[in-house]
Amino acid sequence: MRRTALVIIGHGTRDPQGVAEFRELVAKVAAVAGEWIVEPCFLELAEPDVARGLDCAVERGATEVVALPLLLFAAGHAKRDVPELLADASRRHPSVEFRQAPHLGCHADLIELSVQRYRECGPPAAEDSLLLLIGRGSYDPTANAEMAQFARLRWEAERTAWYEVGFTAMAEPALDRAISVAGDMPFSHVVVQPHLLFAGELLERINVAVQEAADRFPDKSWSVTPHLGPSDLLVSAVLDRAQRSPQPIGGATLPPK
């Protein structure tokens, strides 16, 4: 009898709220995943690690394992670390089939969720507002390009006067530079949107930078939207990506979105 497991791989954080939000998302996925086994794990900074998460799925009876990197963009973790960890797990469990689902990327549900979070902050008049999307950042140029693609799609979905992109680390424009550029642009309002899944140090860094910007540029209003968080739209995106592993998945099937 085939049994399929979905192992959701979070980036990991030391922030207790961020870990709690990740676990809340996993619980929501498990609640609608039908017969699928659902296991959480982390790439770093939290437990269980990925190897343990994969092993737990097998111990619970999985004959097929779909590993889903819960990452917004594909850089070293999705391209190198996860495939290596799956190869190691395959050697430990040669009778089990392991597959990697795509990362989240520019999934339509994420764009919709981003718009929803923007509206939740009670944004000012769109015609005189700049949207500043801030991502994690990466040394991988394709990951940063995907962030730029997401920003354009997001802006097309709900327009402001214009939009800009910045990163908290490892890419340009860095957060402080992006804030300075936004402060010098001819708009009365700047809405900063953290393109981050869960709470953590990076979210705090963005909040501090915006507070400082309000002092540096007192002629503008500054606001920060909520981060993405464990929304039902994120659950929907996870379920959709889980069914898009490289080859057809046998055994139980996830319910439609």
Image (cartoon, rainbow, N blue to C red):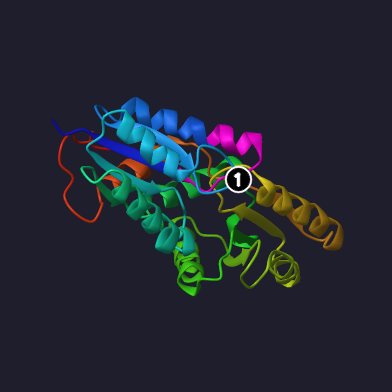
Q: Position of residue 227 (x, y in %)?
A: 58, 45
Q: Is residue 133 left or right of residue 175?
A: left
Packing grade of label 1 (10 A; few <14, some 14-19, many >=20) is few
Is 16 magenta? The answer is: yes
Per the image, the residue denoted by label 1 is: 45
Q: Position of residue 129 (x, y in %)?
A: 64, 60
| Placement of 113 over or under 161, stated as above or below | above
SS state under label 1: loop
Q: Does the rendering let one see residue 143?
A: yes
Is 184 magenta? The answer is: no
Identify the magenta region: 9-21
| Placement of 169 over or under 10, stated as above or below | below
Return the residue nearer the eye: 73 or 195: 73
Q: Does the rendering let one see residue 233?
A: no
Q: Is residue 162 left or right of residue 209?
A: left
For image coordinates 76% across by 56% down, the residue present is: 209
Which quarter shows the N terminus? Answer: top left
Q: Is residue 55 left or right of residue 229?
A: left
